Image (tube, coloured by chain):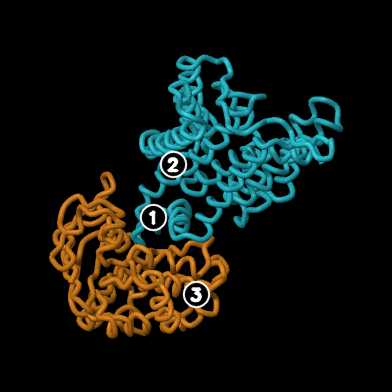
Amino acid sequence: MISIANLSVSFGAVHALTNVSFDAAKGKITAILGANGAGKTTLLRTITGLEEAASGEISLEGTSLLNMRTEDIARAGVGHVPEGRGVIAEFTVLENLRLGSLAAKVNFQDGLAEQFELFPVLGERRSQHAATLSGGERQMLAMARALIAKPSVLLLDEPSLGLAPLVTAEMMATISQLCEKQSLTVLLVEQNAKSALKVAHDAVVLHLGNVVAAASAQEVASDERLRQYYLGLVDQ
Amino acid sequence: MSDVFLGITNGVLYGLIALSLVIVWRSTSILNFAQGAMAMFAAYLGMTMSSHGLNFWACFAIALAAGFALGGLTERVLVRPLYKRPEINSIVVMVGFLGLLESAAAAIWSTAPRTLESPFSQIYFEHHSTTISLSPFALFQIISALVIMTAVGAIFRYTNLGLQLRAAALAPEVARLLGVRVNRLLTFGWMLSSAAGVVAAVVISSSGSIGLSPTIMDGFFVYGFIAAAIGGLESPVGAVVAGLLIGLVQQFLQDYAPSGISSFAPVIILVVALMIRPQGLFSTTKARRV
């Protein structure tokens, strides 16, 4: 379980997150929802030490992550697929995946076989440079690169960004499948609230850095006020 | 044939300097204008030991160790605070460091050239009473440069360390998210680069015709820099090939063209090469801001 307690982050005078608290249950998908500027990406970046917290606590299975370096947080089992995917365009698919496996000291060949089974298209493109992949393939590569290290927590920042609806649906199905099979804890940041709520178990709604709701995905999806004012979901 | 040997002998030195620039560029995306001066300073430290009775190989090893240490120290103290600053900051700091090292070397060891005695003869080989412009020392120069070049190329291309070094340079944030200890790797990249440059400086200091002086590496640095730019800044192979090309062109022009042309020919090659392929002849990057 990953716990966030009274987490605040500021950039100068701007309060990006204010007293954010919630728990993400082990083996479940927690969707982090909200409009642009709500603080979703900042939250994930603070968990992995890319942004500094002003106050509060972040813990993984009781161990504080707050004063750890980003690379040590990754080695502790937190995988982060950043916004824009973060694949290294100059590297081939294989090089990207090998890089993902190094710090975790997992067997690369076994991990590779698992990822190619999960994302067969990556096997076909193994020698291609990441720069030549489509948006969907890059997303798969970014996820496979994080998963090959066998993390216990996976942070996904806007995995559907720029993807066609069909590819987004496939991506969400894969995330759901992973969570079930590997007992993976997933924090899923999405602007596309509708597709995120379909696969998530729980949801946290952020608005201008504050938590306005933290409940089961079902409850959030059926709350008319949240749907209308914070998630932009209007019944057709 | 003599021109070819002489051209290769000089070209490998340019290639080594270019290679050391490429290592730093690939691992930290910084152009180290003090590269030559750092190599010079480490070579002086090694050479100082020869006056205490140490032989050539011991002095070489000390210079290499000093190069490693100086590279690591430079990265930790001078370069690390510059990573998130505009590119011009690192250029200014490294040019300032170049001046500092050269002034310090002149103050400590004087400006008069000194030679480190090498165990290799500098007398040209003879074949059937024909003199070949290649000596045992030149062979040592070529072989040691090729060994360093091959080792560095292999590290970057085939090892996990090389993959992590490249990742740390290309996408440090992503590398950190994957558990790569970026800071350690950046320091190592500078140490490796500095040591590669030291090999060139020790060879130059052992050459009876040149010797080591505080500013001796400036000229070699310019041609090494041109070679690195022609090769594409991130390609070790490009650096070596372009270094050899410059050495050969210079040698042929020196013998067959009016005097003086050989000095600025590398600049013309650079301009033509960058007009044809702005990213460098061996770079896989599509474009680069210069």
Q: Pointer 1 indicates a residue of which chain? A: B
User: Residue A112 location in percent, x, y?
Assistant: 43, 76
* Same chain, labels 1 and 3: no
Is residue B271 found left or right of B75 in the rendered image?
Answer: right
Q: In terms of secondary structure, where does tag 3 sit?
A: helix
Q: Looking at the colours in the rendered structure, which chain would you say is drawn in cyan?
A: B
| Chain letter of the orange region | A
**Within 10 angstroms of label 3, few (less than 14), some, or many (20 or more) residues?**
some
Q: Are marks 2 and 1 in contact (CB under 8 Å)?
A: no
Circle 3 residue: A137
Measured Cα–Cα span from mark 2 to mark 3: 37 Å
Residue with the mark numbered 2: B191
The residue lying at 16 percent from left, 66 percent from top is: A3
Q: Amino acid at mark 2?
A: Met
Residue located 15% across and 58% down the image: A57
Q: Please check whether the numbered discs 2 and 1 fall on a single chain.
A: yes
Q: Quadrant of the C terminus of chain A?
A: bottom left
Few, some or many C-alpha atoms within 10 Å of disc 1 (few <14, some 14-19, many ≥20)?
some
Q: Amino acid at mark 3?
A: Glu
Q: Nearer the viewer, mark 2 or mark 3?
A: 2
| Above or below for B57 versus A48 | above
Asked whether B250 or B42 is in front, the reply is B42
Per the model, the C-alpha gap separating discs 1 and 3 is 21 Å
> Which residue is the site of mark 1?
B173
**Which quadrant: the N terminus of chain A?**
bottom left
- How many neighbours does mark 2 have within 10 angstroms: few (below 14), some (14-19), or many (20 or more)? many
Mark 2 and mark 1 lie on one chain; the one further toward the N terminus is 1
In the figure, residue B77 lies in which quadrant?
top left
The alpha-carbon separation of the residues under discs 2 and 1 comes to 22 Å
Q: Quadrant of residue A165?
A: bottom left
Picture coordinates of residue B181, whole percent (x, y): 34, 53
